[in-house]
Image (cartoon, rainbow, N blue to C red):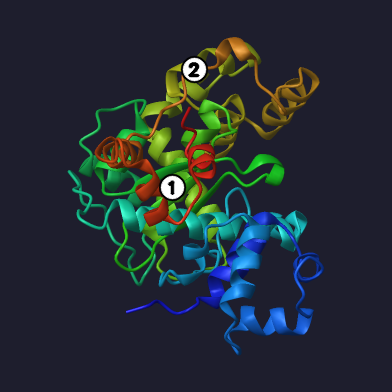
Amino acid sequence: MKSLFNPELLQIARQFRGVSQKSITDQVRITQGYFSKLEKGTMLPKASDVQQIADILNFPLCFFYQTDDVYSLPISIHPMFRKRNSLGQKKLNKILAELNIRLIHIRFFLKNSWLTSSYELPKPSPVLIEPEQTARMVRQIWRVQKGSLNNLVDFVEKSGCLVIMCDFQDTRIDGVTMSLPKLPHCIFVNKNMSADRFRFTLAHELGHIVLHSIPSENMEQEANDFAAELLMPANDIEDQLVKLDIYKLSSLKPVWKVSMAALLMRAKKLNTLREQQINYLWRQLSAAGYRTKEPPELDFEKEKPTVLEMYIDHTLNNAVGNEATLYEQLCIREDEFKRMYFIE
């Protein structure tokens, strides 16, 4: 049975390329009104029109006939919801389009399997449990010893989540989590972050998964509180956050694998320093330029997700000698696929 034209994927393809309806209709002998009706699904296109549009947008024709659903962005986008307004709708649409294309690929990779998990994460409660308490619960489920949590991404993936590295470029978006039917929790993380910011973002996104089934006014702060307790448990770090100076902050960073700024914010949360001391240290960090970029000599290796890469490698290895068919099944051009998944 021949698939029907999917108008939502027409919009996704256009937004992924970051172009307007008019820029397309100027190149195809159709009106913008007709094109608008195609995107809205109120009119079926001629096959020849779809082929021309596919050529202009540089997508295989089959892309527009896939049956996958299209999803909107979640309410929470890390670092902060208010950043959505500063991004501009065009950039948000482009990110949304990329995430939907990646979700199509993930369904393909997982179509004959399901992620196994070594740990079962707590589910969001109708009555919010304190974020810090939930973080302690997660550490107990993971059987983490006291102190720093090493290889966070490994624990997250072993809890049945997919961590997907993306190039969000200059959007200032660090992470987005999509929790959808018949898919694992998909945590999309900006690859352009430092190792410490990557860890905090991943912990923050995990906070949304275990805390929030529906949006709430304080959900971003709650996810931050969860992340802080998960990475810097109060009972383990409190004694180390006294008598702080910029040198002690720098020595604690590689131990806890969080930023100097995150350590200082933790000290404020736990009241281990007076407000005057906190403000003085913030001024020192600003004067040294560490609010923008912390010393490179304190950097540590960024954790690397492995599960999706394993599925991609398995798929590519099985397609050796028949790669063209694979990319036809994925409805994407080979060069684009390799660019999206950072394959040399």
Secondary structure, mark 1, is helix
Q: Position of residue 204 (x, y in %)?
A: 47, 46
Q: Nearer the viewer, residue 134 or 306?
A: 306
User: Is 120 positioned to the left or the right of 157 in the image?
Assistant: left
Task: Say which quarter of the image contains residue 331.
Answer: bottom left
Q: Nearer the viewer, residue 342 or 92?
A: 342
- Crowdedness of circle 1 by 10 Å Cα count: few (<14), some, many (20+)? many
* Quadrant hosting residue 98: bottom right
Total numbered labels:
2
Residue 329 in percent (x, y) is at: 37, 56
Quadrant assignment for the N terminus = bottom left
The label on residue 131 is none
Viewer-closest of 198 and 57: 57
Query: Residue at horizontal 54%, vertical 38%?
Result: 339
Query: Does residue 33 sit above or below 29 in this rendering?
Result: below
* 10 on left or right of 256: right
Say which residue label 1 marks: 226
Image marks 1 and 2: residues in contact by CB distance under 8 Å: no
Q: Amino acid at mark 1?
A: Phe
Q: Secondary structure at mark 2?
A: loop
Name the amino acid type tagged 2.
Answer: Phe
Q: What numbered label is drawn on residue 300?
A: 2
